[in-house]
Each structure stands twice: as structure tokens, then as C-alpha cells.
Image (tube, rainbow, N blue to C red):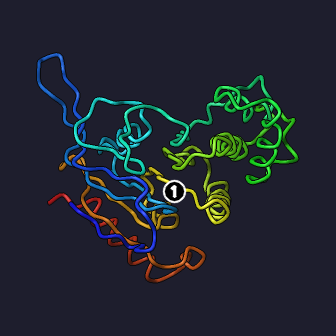
Amino acid sequence: MQFKNPYPRQKVSLSLKNVSKQYSQRNSETNIVLENINIQIFEGEIITILGKSGCGKSTLLNLIAGFENSYSGEILLNGKPVKDISPDRIMMFQESALFPWLTAFQNVEIALQMAKVPKNQRKNIVKHNLDIVGLSDYSNSYIHQLSGGMKQRVSLARALSLNPQILLMDEPFAALDITIKKSLYKELLDLHEKTRKTILFVTHNINEAVLLGDRVIVMSPRIYGIKKEYVIDIPKDQRNDNLSIKNIINEITADLYDTV
């Protein structure tokens, strides 16, 4: 399935060509997870990837991140093959994966230490990214002193500190209550306006996918891949209580649960 560029002035950032992934089982059979995935992702887009459990959406993100390199087809970032992990593609998970014995500042800084960023540069980078996510006043707080939403913002600051080209987000808000989620939606969109990062956001929440995405890619486990793409060209600040958005949500809901 080929998709047209809805942003003709933007260059392709990430390209997947005929990407397939399967696992060998003990009985010598193979378990197909993804088959012939073709996507072009453009610089500065937010792509939301939507689907039921088991449709391969997290596997797709893992392949792009470089966590798994046994697949067929091509994954290209700026025209170069993706075969391993790299700071230009950073994953943010559902669980914050923070170190509880470190402060918010130290949790962000440790990513820079691991990336061998010189010590004299780290302080300004950490402060800048904690400021972007609104946590400047909590830089010396330990993780147990922070709410769930604040923990995810620390994780986001840590990811941004490495200045990735692509931010990969695997259901990062799934464990949070709806009030915190709505607050983080706004913060993510505000952050995107500031940074223009390319973001791939996996979710099983239809409303979340439509509120955040420039495009929504619906995946299906029955075809091991992409069932349909929706381009959401309504400004993001106009999507709440918008009739057209409600119609798109209804259409995606029908598409997602279609058994034909």
C-alpha cells in the first residue's frame, strides 16, 4: 500500500519499504507479525499508529528503533538503512523506566553521560529540556516525589536531551488517568510546535490517535499490516468537540472493528 505525501513541501524523513517480520516457532512453523509494510513519514509529522493488541504496532516501533534487526525489506532514515539503535531514534515507553534513587535532573543527565556528552555541556542541556516539559522547579526532586504525569515528562525530557530526529512513543500515556492524559496531550502538542520533531506514537485509543495525529495509520492483525490511513487536516486546537473529528472517529471505529 502506497501513500501520497500530504505535506509536499516537507522531505521524507523515514521510509519503510516492504518491511516484513516473522518469528520461528518450536514446531518449525513461522509466526508472521508484519508483512509488506510500506510507509513514508515526513519531517515534522506526528504519526499515530492505531490497532488492536497483537497487530504488530509495537513490533513496528521496535524495528524502527533498531531493537530488532532481523527483518526483510528496508527501513531508511534520511536514505540510510536502519539496522541498530542510535540516538537519532529514541523510544519512550509506557512505563517511565526512571531510576528512583536519582533526581529528575540526574535521570535526564544519565542519558547524556551514556551518550558521552562532555560534562561541561550536560548541565545546560538538562536544564533546557526540563524547562521544555515544564519541570524546571522539580529538577532536584526524586522520582517517588513526582506524580505519574510528571514522571512521564521526565522521561520525555530525557528522550529530548539526545536531540533525536525521530521520537518513538509506545503507549506512553496508557497507564495514566484521563485528566492527566488530557494535560499531557496539550503539552506534547505544545512541545511539537517548539521542536518540530518527527513523532511516531503507538496507541490503542482511537480518540488519542485522532486528537494527536497528522495522520492515523490503522493496523490489522488479519493482514499483518496497514489496513487504512487517515489524513487529519483539521488544526489540532480545533479538534475537541468538532463534528468532523467525531465523524472521523466513528469511521475509524467501524474500520478498526470491521470483521469482514
Horizontal and vertical percent position of residue 40: 34, 59
Disc 1 is placed on an element classified as strand
Please determine whether, in this image, residue 212 is positioned above or below residue 162.
below
- Nearest the viewer among 170 and 125 is 125
Quadrant of the snapshot with the C terminus:
bottom left
| Residue at the bottom extreme, as displayed | 243
- Nearest the viewer among 240 and 104 is 104
* Left or right of 244 on screen, residue 253: left
Q: Amino acid at mark 1?
A: Thr
Quadrant of the snapshot with the N terminus:
bottom left
* Left or right of 54 on screen, residue 163: right
Please determine whether, in this image, residue 56 is positioned above or below residue 251.
above
Please determine whether, in this image, residue 108 is positioned above or below residue 243.
above
* Left or right of 184 on screen, residue 234: left
- Residue located at (48% from left, 63% from top): 45
> According to the image, label 1 marks what residue?
198
Horizontal and vertical percent position of residue 212: 52, 64
Name which quarter of the figure residue 251 lies in.
Answer: bottom left
Horizontal and vertical percent position of residue 7: 42, 73
